[in-house]
């Protein structure tokens, strides 16, 4: 069924939805990240941003795995309701990963290694 021909939905609503979809800034955080990387002026800048993001993802995953080793029997940050704590920790680990990867003093060095290995393949 083609919803654009339905008499239940007014054409103004359809136009508004189409406009919103066509002019949406981003779909989600991954799309935002992709846009930031593609927005770099040169391919080398894009490579640097992608390598740094790879390092931040690695650090985030490492923190999440480390968190699995912690004794969960004790009360967490928000009492016994771990639903909120898990959501908060996921956001927190992601931000910590980005902060560590983007700071030259705290970086693990993966981004630099990836960049040096791949830079010969970009213009």
Image: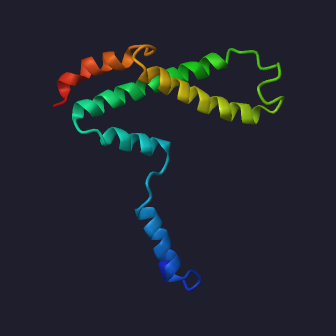
Quadrant assignment, res 45? top left
Residue 15 picture location, percent across and down: 46, 75
Residue 117 vertical position relative to residue 86 in the rendered view, above or below = above
Identify which residue is drawn at 18% across, 22% down. Answer: 120
Quadrant (top left, top right, bottom left, bottom right) of the C terminus: top left
Residue 14 vertical position relative to residue 51 in the rendered view, above or below = below
Q: Nearer the viewer, residue 45 or 71?
A: 45
Question: Taking 83 as reference, is 50 left or right?
Answer: left
> Can residue 3 be seen at all in this image of the molecule?
no
Q: Which colour scheme is used?
A: rainbow
Q: Nearer the viewer, residue 113 or 45?
A: 45
Quadrant assignment, res 88? top right
The outermost residue toward the bottom is: 7
> Can residue 58 be seen at all in this image of the molecule?
yes
Identify which residue is drawn at 60% across, 29% down. Answer: 92
Residue 54 picture location, percent across and down: 41, 26
């Amino acid at each position: 069924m083609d919803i654009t021909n339905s008499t239940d939905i007014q054409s103004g609503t359809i136009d508004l939805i189409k406009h919103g979809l066509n002019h949406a800034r981003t779909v989600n955080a991954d799309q935002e990240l992709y846009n930031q990387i593609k927005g770099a002026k040169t391919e080398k800048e894009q490579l640097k941003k992608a390598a740094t993001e790879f390092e931040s993802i690695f650090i985030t995953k490492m923190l999440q795995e480390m968190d699995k080793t912690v004794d969960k029997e004790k009360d967490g940050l928000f009492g016994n309701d771990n639903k909120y704590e898990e959501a908060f920790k996921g956001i927190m680990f992601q931000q910590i990963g980005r902060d560590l990867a983007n700071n030259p003093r705290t970086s693990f060095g993966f981004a630099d290694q990836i960049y040096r290995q791949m830079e010969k393949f970009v213009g």
